[in-house]
Image (cartoon, coloured by chain):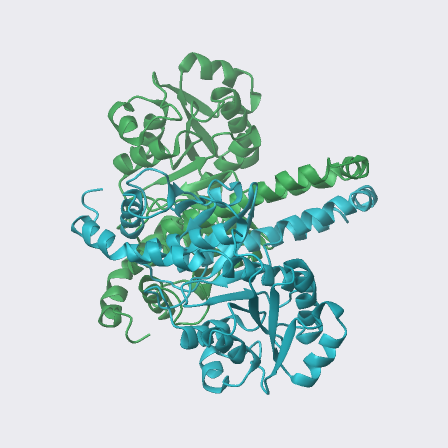
Chain colours: A green, B cyan
Amino acid sequence: MGGIVNQPLVISVDVMGGDHGPSVVTPGVARAASLLGAQARFLLHGDEAQVTAEVARHPALAGRCEVRHAGRVIAMDEKPAQALRRGKGSSMWNAVESVKAGEAAAVVSAGNTGALMAVSKLLLRMSADLDRPPLVVGWPSGRGVTTFLDVGANVDCDAERLVEFAILGEAYHRAAHGVARPTVGLLNVGSEDMKGHGEVREAHRILREGRFDLNYHGFVEGDDLSHGVVDVVVTDGFTGNVALKTAEGAARFIKDELRAALTSGLLAKSGAMLARGALQRLGQRLNPPPAAPLLGLNGIVVKCHGGASEQDFAQALRVAADLAQSDFAAEIERNMGRLPAAMAESHPAADGASS
Amino acid sequence: MGGIVNQPLVISVDVMGGDHGPSVVTPGVARAASLLGAQARFLLHGDEAQVTAEVARHPALAGRCEVRHAGRVIAMDEKPAQALRRGKGSSMWNAVESVKAGEAAAVVSAGNTGALMAVSKLLLRMSADLDRPPLVVGWPSGRGVTTFLDVGANVDCDAERLVEFAILGEAYHRAAHGVARPTVGLLNVGSEDMKGHGEVREAHRILREGRFDLNYHGFVEGDDLSHGVVDVVVTDGFTGNVALKTAEGAARFIKDELRAALTSGLLAKSGAMLARGALQRLGQRLNPPPAAPLLGLNGIVVKCHGGASEQDFAQALRVAADLAQSDFAAEIERNMGRLPAAMAESHPAADGASS
């Protein structure tokens, strides 16, 4: 967003990842090439013959990319441990390695999420004191998109981890959405200070003290995600995963019931036919954004969803470019540096007795 | 459900509770009087003049109810502590006291939830080892209604509490929905044994051992609530509250967006007009049931939502009657009696190391 323009920007791409591989990823890169302007260049990792043939079809990619052969592909259903053991030399592994080697500013993959997390962690290492990168999702809301994390990677979270998620999510939201001072909320069962369990109350106390460069709003509740009350909502990976899957299940149920209602008779069917365009636009509006970063790594890694379209993949590359051209990493480092002092100071009251 | 027929059944009613008071509650009782048959009788607590005038309008209530004067009403926004201090002699207090005194088999109120919980706890006492009754909600699903608890009363839950919720929820679901062997699931972030945090894994281990008379299915995930994979879903009050509010927020967002989409142009508007009947039926299908019990008390207490219609209140009385005529309390007592042995046996492995 707020970026260094006209400087070369290299993005590394796992061309073999995702449900469709090169036939969708390559045109996605071509779209992004037009979208991002001449300074963007691409390192394309995958089967050389296949990728080269795809690249030749897109004039937008001429002179803008380099194909790097990778003889292996990590399958979408491979276990992370297996990907670590046998993934070396795969398109995903090599794509991440380009970031580690400093050849690329960011990597994008639509491949296996668990494998991407494991390979990125191994090659780039965590910058934050976390087991693994929190999973981030863009939650469609009345005000646009709410950044929500962790939706499943770190099940047990103490107050310190929740504060780390706040730091990571805030920097990401600014870089990806161009919001100067994103507001941050902590997910709880009420808005008063004494609500919730010990971890969430301690994190609240630490964030409220204002030691971090964060626009901290306070506690938010589950329905605030869709209201868009704050830009970033922070929770532990257990609660976040349950909330995400519960809402997805409810949304699917409503869609199925709506479909059943609109095919329940001649009147309803005719009505649905007339309203079809509006209903399709609604469906798109409710879809979450196709890409999200793996945060807390020493390097920018963006995960695009497996069933991504060309547009989706181009959108993921745009997120990678926005992150790479922002002060994202430096902002995170600055705030993370304040964490030890904030934790040490808070600890005398950490038993919750004073809240 | 499976009940003692032709035996008198007395239900105590807080006629002043809810947003509308006697003008909606009394016709609701009249509906229930027809619905439940001649053995059902009602103790109506409230302002004598007002309630007597309402009763006179409903021939179905002639000879079926007794009005008991209460000079006070607990307001919908009164704090529970305040309700405890000043609630004595109110319609809600007296209605609960009728159950304590053995004059009624159950009580129904559409009044202030926090106050009803506090007054019931004080007068009836908890049977289970819980701080307060878990909050139960009926979750609309593809297979009917999923019983979901705790949606907010007990924020910190160890394994023992989760097992107690399973016992309470199962007995309630059978009594209220007539399902002989309701299936019970424990909410988690995956279905494998090693998933989740320590409390949920320990509860899983205890329930799996089969010491209880429960049809335990295993772990379920957030989207299984709407799929209706099991009849009863158990979680702690923190996760349950967040899941419920998140799904409510998402559903409201979808409804708002649907309304916007269907008024976005002439075609869409005409379509919506034709499909109106189907869309209205859909809206009703997505509403949760209007009543839920406060579980874990020595007595049957049913809470009807504050904005209840006559039909809703009649439905709440039907739930109370079903619970009162079932083996609900005895079933809970039997399973609760097995809890100490199950906990003692499980405890050596309670640190989670063996899972």
User: In terms of image quadrants, where is residue B336?
Assistant: bottom left
Residue at the far left: name it. B348
At horizontal 32% and vertical 49% (from top left) the residue drawn is B200
**Residue A76, position as x, y percentages in the image:** 40, 26
**Residue A225, position as x, y percentages in the image:** 52, 55
At horizontal 49% and vertical 56% (from top left) the residue drawn is B326
> With A149 as the anchor, is B322 left or right in this view?
right
User: In terms of image quadrants, where is residue B153?
Assistant: bottom left
At horizontal 32% and vertical 27% (from top left) the residue drawn is A93
**Residue B348, position as x, y percentages in the image:** 16, 50
**Residue B100, position as x, y percentages in the image:** 45, 75
> With B161 as the anchor, is A27 left or right in this view?
right
Foreground of the two, A248 or B198: B198
Position above or below: A160 against A346:
above
Position above or below: B318 against A75:
below
> With B272 as the anchor, is A251 left or right in this view?
left
Note whether residue A4 is visible.
Answer: no
